[in-house]
Image (cartoon, rainbow, N blue to C red):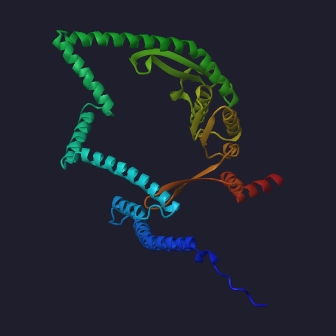
Amino acid sequence: MAKTPRTWTGARTPSGLKRVRQAQSRHEVLQPRRTAAKTFVAKALSAAAQPADSTIDPIAALAEALSALDGVAGIADELDAASGELRELDMRLRDVASTVRAFTSALEVDPGRLEQVEAELERLADLRRRYRVETTAELVERSAAARAELDALADGVDPVAASAEALDRAQGRADELVAALAKERRGAAAPFAAAVSAELEGIGMGEGEFVTELGEREPSSSGADEVTFLIRPNPGLPLAPVAQTASGGELSRIALAIAAVGGGSTMIFDEIDAGIGGQTAHAVADTLVRLSERAQVVAITHLPQIASRADRHFSVEKVPGDPTHTRIRELGEEERREEIERMLGGREFLSTVGDNASG
């Protein structure tokens, strides 16, 4: 079946011909503008896509893009919207540039300023060393005090009399503190000695007697009391200063007992086991475990009776080298068993002891 050709009959009318001519005329007018729009937009996009270190002026590039879009205004809504956004961006960019220019113009360019500042800092450091202060704030306080003293001199105040008055006030306050400390010590001496004696009983010195004696001495930062610890190791012996009477093992146990009574939240014992062993070492270990319930206890020991009771075990060893250094590391369970065995005399020794006991 043959197809009937389609024709535009409206174009044959005078009004139809007029519309065709108007469309052709509009196309002929807009075509150059569309071509120009493509060119302008391509240039604008090319300028916007320049890298940050490009020498192109962003404001100039933005102005060029705006000019390009102004040249094609009314062709498309999308281009008109883009033109409005670029115009707003242009205003914001110019505001930012103006602010930065104002800031940089306000900066004082003085090549010698850095040298001047460094010299001033060095002078302040010298003053801190001279007047033995740690901070510049303390230096300022000293300066204010010196000015006040100078003002007092100007007002007729005798600096010697003022210093004597200040010394009397400070001495009076020191005397009050010394008296209060002495009173507290006298009240605590007997209970403290009784508590230490109780601790000594638990570590194998039950027959001993411990006494705190207070005397007088010249006042110092620790008061005006001469504190002496006296010990009677066995009945029938006179009381004597611990430092002169106690043996090495007794000194270790007395130090432990004093720390157990007066120690704080952390106690460190460096070879508290010196001069002791056997059952006494077990008693010292029991005391350390009891103290660890209320404080952190660190004990450096060579005795397996004490090391085996610790929650954590660290090995400290000297490593030869240049220079020689010390290494400390926490032991695992297997390493700890081996270390305890070594402290007991080694596997061969333990085997011999076991054979002798069984024989």
The image shows residue 74, relative to residue 149, as above or below, that is: below
**Which part of the image, by quadrant, shows the C terminus?**
bottom right
228 or 188, nearer to the observer: 188
Farthest residue to the bottom: give it.
Answer: 1
Report whether residue 238 is seen.
no
Residue 310 image position (x, y, % from top left) = 68, 43
The image shows residue 249, relative to residue 31, as above or below, that is: above
Report whether residue 3 is seen.
yes
Location of residue 275 by image quarter = top right
248 or 340, nearer to the observer: 340
350 or 36, nearer to the observer: 36
Report the number of discs: 0
Residue 59 image position (x, y, % from top left) = 35, 58
Residue 95 image position (x, y, % from top left) = 36, 48
Residue at image point 75% right, 90% down: 2
**Which part of the image, by quadrant, shows the N terminus?**
bottom right
Q: Is residue 212 left or right of residue 173?
A: right
Residue at image point 39% right, 67% down: 47
Residue at image point 55% right, 22% down: 230
